[in-house]
């Protein structure tokens, strides 16, 4: 059974502040010292007719608040001289307010029935003391239980964390073992692939040995002991072709061997990486084992600490029990000192009541005097407040006037500062305008000179361009349409088919070989003459390119286009020797395209004239021109690099010449074979070789022409786009210049209209105008408008 008492309001007198009210026990504490609450002690005190405000608590409360050995507060009295009576133990009872205790009528420590002083007031005081002691004990027990709960919760959380860490370590171990198994599988697979790759080179070596044996046999069979006849040359040609084939096969084998070696190296690198990973995994396993061992050691240490804490808590519990025994002894001492304290209380209360009456009379007289003094002081204060209010109003008016004056001064200062800044900015702007005008005038002179030079160079370049157009009339200069290229490819294929038909007919007409040999000789002579003409033209074009290299500074891209066209013309002549029938149609198409190009060039010249006029109108263009000159220098460098590419084209021409010489040699061999009695099989083989060589050369020429035409088209489009962008930038820049000039003129007119003579003089000094005594605003406006 539990007792419920009123709540304690004075936290300072209770142990550990407000912890008693926050405890888990259902009991609450009644404050004996709080006079506002209505309880048994306050009713007892009021029944004695004692004034609580005048009398101190020490005079009617003999006990004082003392500290127990464990730090908690208690209300036990410090009476050591009295001897306690030997009665029943109060702490062995279940509850002092139980019905069984009342029925048994056992004498409890708080219910001692003194026959001499058996008073209900004393019993009420004893019951209150008992309730406070019971609450103190319950608070201590609840605090101990709370500490035990917190400790248990901490231990449970620590155990959970330890279990989680163990589970994570176990999972990591499983993952690492799975990874090791995967790595081992990968190692086995890599070893198998390495074995396969090692078998591949051995097979290739065996094949090489077999090929070498076959080559030796072919060499032995190609050199029989017989006289030098016409068939020997054919055999030599066959041997050469076979040697080429075998060399190509050897090169392919070498490449495959190199690839296999690279694959082996990559496999070795992967194996090394996998070994490193395996070593890292071993290290991780070792670290995991070490962490497990350390975790086991920590767990053992934690168990030891838990045991130590349990033993410490048991010792604390024993100490708390000893303290409870001491509190019981103090209660018995309280009972003995309680009787003597009551007598002393009665005497002290009588004496204090008399003193209180006297002090109340004196206080009433003092209060009357103080009230009179307060009234007089309040009147004085009212007068002083009126005077202070008047002074405040006057001060506020003065402050407002001062603020107005300060605002006016600030506005005047701001206007002066603005006028000074405007004058200074106008002077600086005028100086900058004058310096800019001088620089622009000088730069205009240089620009005009450069424009004259550019015009002369443009005229020279136009003349040379016309000469080059007459020479390169057979080439495509428009934006290289893919349809025309496809048509040319189709015509070339048709020509190839016609050539194949001619060769078949030639095989049928072996009886007329003498006539064919004569026609071949004529064709060879014609080809030699055409090659000589091409070489002469190429030599002349090289000279022209060398001359034009010095003038590439202003028009590098145009010269590059002409050089590419010249080289393409030479190669086109070498590659399209047998296209005389379709030349007339192509000439007509090219003339139309050239006419279009001429129109485009004329339009470009007109645009150049317009640009020159815009350049003359644009006065402040120096900075952009310098930047553009730097860009042109960079373009010249790129043009020089591209001229090096022209050297590569010349090397291609030389290769074509070598191919033509080889073709001549082959034709001479055919002639020699025709002069002698050659078999038909040998002639068929020679014709087949010639046909293959012709097809290869034509395909190579077609590819080179398509690539060169694509390149030329891209470069021309890039140049046109760049010129258009440059023209747009120049126009935008000139428009900005016009807008700025108009704005400056309007600003100057506005300054002249609204400013005084001092600002006009400053403008004259900034613009460095001659001083005129009779200068008016109208004259200044007219000069600015001009």
Image (cartoon, helix red, strand yellow):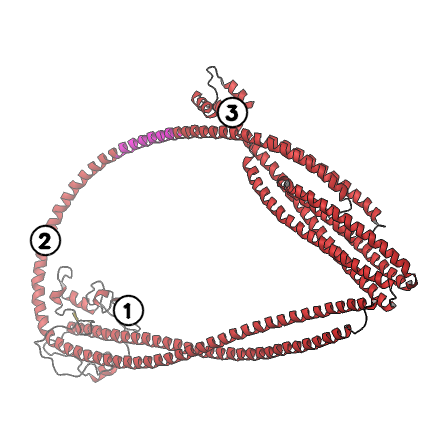
Please report the bounds of the magenta region as a residue range: 392-414
Farthest residue, direction bottom: 104
x then y, percent, for residue 491: 82, 54
Q: Relative to 774, does residue 767 appear above or below in the rendering? A: below
Q: Classify residue 680 as left or right of residue 469.
A: right
Neighbor class of circle 2 (other Cα within 10 Å; few <14, some 14-19, many 20+) is: few
Q: Relative to 737, does residue 516 appear above or below in the rendering? A: below
Disc ID at residue 21: 1
x then y, percent, for residue 681: 86, 69
Q: Which numbered disc, 3 or 2, marks the residue closer to the eye?
A: 3
x then y, percent, for residue 630: 56, 42
First in sequence: mark 3 vs mark 2: 2
Q: Main secondary structure of the magenta part?
A: helix
Q: Quadrant of residue 601?
A: top right
Disc ID at residue 749: 3
First in sequence: mark 1 vs mark 3: 1
Neighbor class of circle 3 (other Cα within 10 Å; few <14, some 14-19, many 20+) is: some
Q: Quadrant of residue 113?
A: bottom left
Regarding residue 340, the answer to whether it shows in the image is: yes
Task: From the viewer's side, name the closer residue of 724 and 270.
Answer: 270
**CA distance for labels 3 and 2:** 99 Å
Residue 211 part of the magenta segment: no
Task: From the viewer's side, name the closer residue of 325 and 49.
Answer: 325
First in sequence: mark 1 vs mark 2: 1
Residue tagged by mark 2?
361
Q: Relative to 249, does residue 430 appear above or below in the rendering? A: above
């Amino acid at each position: 059974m539990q007792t419920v008492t009123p709540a304690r309001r004075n936290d300072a007198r209770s142990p550990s502040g407000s912890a008693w009210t926050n405890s888990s026990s259902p009991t609450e504490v009644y404050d004996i010292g709080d006079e506002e609450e209505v309880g048994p002690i306050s009713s007892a005190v009021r029944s004695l007719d004692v004034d609580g405000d005048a009398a101190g608590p020490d005079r009617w409360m003999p006990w004082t608040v003392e500290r127990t050995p464990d730090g908690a507060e208690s209300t036990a009295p410090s009476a050591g001289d009295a001897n306690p009576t030997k009665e029943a133990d109060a702490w062995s009872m279940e509850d002092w307010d139980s019905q069984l205790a009342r029925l048994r009528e056992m004498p409890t420590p708080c219910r001692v029935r003194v026959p001499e002083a058996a008073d209900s007031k004393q019993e009420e005081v004893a019951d209150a003391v008992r309730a406070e002691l019971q609450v103190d004990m319950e608070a201590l027990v609840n605090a101990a239980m709370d500490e035990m709960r917190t400790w248990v919760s901490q231990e449970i959380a620590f155990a959970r964390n330890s279990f989680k860490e163990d589970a994570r370590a176990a999972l990591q171990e499983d993952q690492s073992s799975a990874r090791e198994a995967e790595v081992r599988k990968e190692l086995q697979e890599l070893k198998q692939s390495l074995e396969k790759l090692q078998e591949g080179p051995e097979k290739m070596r065996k094949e090489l040995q077999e090929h070498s044996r076959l080559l030796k046999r072919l060499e032995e069979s190609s050199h029989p002991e017989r006289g030098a006849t016409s068939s020997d040359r054919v055999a030599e040609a066959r041997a050469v072709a076979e040697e080429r084939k075998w060399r190509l096969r050897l090169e392919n084998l070498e490449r495959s061997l190199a690839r296999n070696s690279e694959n082996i190296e990559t496999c070795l690198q992967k194996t090394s990486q996998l070994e490193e990973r395996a070593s890292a995994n071993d290290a991780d396993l070792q670290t995991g084992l070490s962490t497990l061992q350390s975790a086991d050691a920590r767990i053992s240490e934690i168990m030891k600490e838990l045991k130590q804490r349990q033993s410490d808590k048991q010792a604390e519990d024993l100490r708390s029990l000893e303290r409870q025994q001491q509190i019981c002894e103090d209660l018995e001492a309280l009972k003995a000192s309680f009787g003597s304290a009551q007598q002393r209380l009665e005497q002290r209360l009588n004496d204090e009541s008399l003193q209180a009456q006297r002090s109340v009379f004196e206080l009433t007289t003092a209060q009357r005097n103080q009230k009179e003094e307060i009234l007089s002081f309040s009147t004085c204060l009212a007068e002083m407040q009126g005077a202070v209010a008047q002074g405040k109003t006057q001060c506020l008016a003065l402050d407002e006037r001062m603020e107005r004056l300060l605002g006016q001064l600030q506005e005047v200062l701001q206007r002066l500062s603005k006028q000074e800044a405007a004058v200074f900015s106008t002077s600086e702007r005028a100086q900058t305008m004058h310096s800019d005008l001088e620089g622009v005038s000088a730069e205009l002179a240089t620009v005009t000179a450069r424009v004259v030079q550019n015009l002369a160079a443009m005229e020279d370049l136009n003349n040379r361009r016309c000469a080059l157009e007459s020479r390169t009339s057979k080439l495509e200069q428009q934006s290289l349409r893919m349809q025309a290229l496809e048509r040319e490819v189709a015509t070339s294929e048709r020509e190839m088919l016609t050539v194949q038909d001619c060769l078949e007919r030639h095989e049928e007409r072996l009886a007329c070989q003498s006539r064919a040999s004569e026609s071949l000789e004529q064709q060879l002579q014609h080809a030699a003459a055409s090659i000589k003409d091409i070489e002469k033209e190429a030599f002349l074009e090289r000279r022209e390119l060398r001359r034009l290299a010095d003038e590439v500074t202003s028009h590098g891209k145009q010269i590059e286009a002409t050089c590419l066209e010249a080289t393409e013309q030479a190669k086109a002549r070498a590659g399209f020797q047998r296209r005389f029938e379709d030349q007339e149609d192509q000439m007509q198409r090219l003339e139309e395209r050239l006419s279009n190009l001429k129109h485009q060039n004329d339009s470009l010249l007109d645009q150049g004239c317009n640009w020159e006029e815009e350049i003359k109108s644009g006065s402040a263009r120096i900075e952009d021109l310098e930047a553009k000159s730097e860009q042109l220098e960079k373009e010249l460098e790129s043009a020089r690099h591209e001229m090096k590419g022209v050297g590569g084209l010349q090397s291609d021409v030389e290769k074509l010449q070598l191919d033509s010489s080889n073709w001549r040699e082959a034709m001479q061999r055919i002639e020699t074979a025709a002069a002698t009695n050659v078999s038909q099989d040998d002639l068929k083989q020679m014709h087949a070789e010639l046909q293959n060589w012709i097809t290869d050369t034509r395909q190579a020429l077609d590819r080179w022409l398509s690539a060169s035409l694509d390149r030329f088209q891209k470069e021309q489009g890039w140049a046109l786009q760049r010129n258009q962008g440059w023209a747009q930038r120049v126009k935008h820049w000139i428009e900005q210049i016009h807008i700025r000039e108009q704005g400056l003129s309007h600003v100057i007119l506005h300054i002249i209209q609204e400013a005084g003579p001092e600002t006009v003089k400053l403008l004259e000094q900034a613009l460095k105008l001659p001083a005129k005594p009779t200068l008016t605003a109208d004259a200044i406006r007219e000069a600015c408008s001009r």
